[in-house]
Image (cartoon, grey):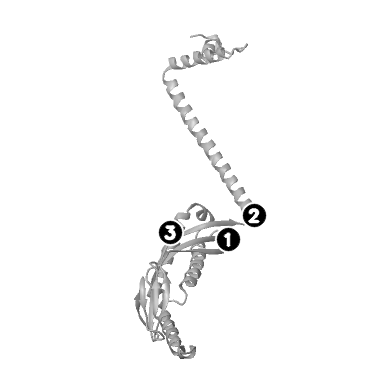
């Protein structure tokens, strides 16, 4: 027998091999197959070995692992009219493979675009100080909005993290001046409050000393002791004016 006699068998083997390659599919543990029969959805299969009818059934592979997507830098104008550039990262995964294929054309692109618009919308409602100081709250708000809107696509948004908030150099200088003015204001308020408290305490002390004359005398002696401790060459003694009253009485009358 010549080689041409084996040609039909060879063609049959190749044809069977080709049909098997179209019929046999292996899904990994993190993959699911969305199967269509004559264009109609017929179920989700996997993981493991899947047999399909060639030319009649087709499948679309869907990865169920968590996807990390970097949201491009977005131009945002805050509520206090400060222009900033903000970028973020989102973590999401497919939990319903059929919805991810049937409900949206490209769930990766759709989620990315939705994340960009949501980032601009949410941050535009807050002031710059809130963007810098309350990132956890903003992350939670963005994650909640994205998760509610992507639920119809069978996607679960697990987390959102704002990475960078870039401010223009001129605005940085303005913010620095504002922060310095705020610190000066607080310093003046603290100084004024200290003066007020000191005045209140002085009034309380004077009231207490006025009630008991002996206390004033003790305070006088304490002051002399403090002056002596400082080794001054001159000591000034306060002279009570009450001692001069008998000598300054009108018409030379004395008590």
Point out which mark residue 85 bears.
1
> Distance between the Cα atoms at labels 2 and 3?
29 Å
Q: Residue furthest front?
A: 1
Horizontal side of 18 relative to 228 (left or right) equals left
Q: Position of residue 191 (x, y in %)?
A: 54, 36
* Element assignment for label 2: helix
Residue 157 location, quadrant: bottom left
Residue 244 location, quadrant: top right
> Distance between the Cα atoms at labels 2 and 1?
12 Å
Which tag, 2 or 1, sits closer to the chain's start?
Answer: 1
> Distance between the Cα atoms at labels 1 and 3?
19 Å
Closest to the observer, 253 or 237? 237
Q: Position of residue 166 (x, y in %)?
A: 58, 57
Q: Position of residue 84 (x, y in %)?
A: 58, 59
Q: Position of residue 144 (x, y in %)?
A: 41, 63
Residue 41 location, quadrant: bottom left
Nearest to the eye among marks 2 and 3: give it.
3
Judging by the rendered image, the residue that carries numbered circle 3 is 140
Judging by the rendered image, the residue that carries numbered circle 2 is 169
């Amino acid at each position: 027998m010549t080689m041409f006699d084996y040609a039909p068998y060879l063609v049959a083997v190749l044809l069977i091999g080709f049909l098997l390659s179209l019929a046999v599919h292996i899904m990994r543990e993190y993959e699911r197959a969305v199967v269509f029969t004559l264009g109609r959805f017929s179920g989700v299969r996997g993981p493991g070995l899947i047999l399909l009818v060639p030319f009649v059934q087709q499948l679309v592979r869907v990865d169920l692992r968590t996807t990390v997507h970097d949201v491009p830098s977005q131009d945002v104008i805050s509520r206090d009219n400060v222009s900033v550039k903000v970028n973020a990262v989102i973590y999401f995964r497919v939990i319903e493979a059929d919805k991810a294929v049937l409900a949206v054309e490209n769930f990766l692109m759709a989620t990315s675009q939705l994340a960009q618009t949501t980032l601009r919308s949410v941050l535009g409602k807050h002031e710059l100080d809130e963007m810098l100081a309350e990132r956890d709250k903003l992350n939670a708000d963005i994650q909640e909005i994205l998760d509610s809107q992507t639920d119809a696509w069978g996607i679960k948004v697990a987390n959102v993290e704002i990475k960078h908030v870039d401010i223009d150099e001129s605005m940085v200088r303005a913010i620095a001046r504002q922060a310095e003015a705020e610190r000066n204001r607080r310093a003046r308020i603290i100084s004024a409050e200290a003066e007020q408290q000191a005045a209140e305490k002085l009034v309380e002390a004077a009231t207490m000393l006025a009630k008991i004359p002996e206390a004033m005398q003790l305070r006088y002696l304490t002051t002399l002791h403090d002056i002596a401790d400082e080794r001054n060459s001159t000591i000034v003694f306060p002279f009570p004016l009450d001692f001069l009253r008998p000598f300054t009485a009108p018409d030379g009358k004395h008590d």
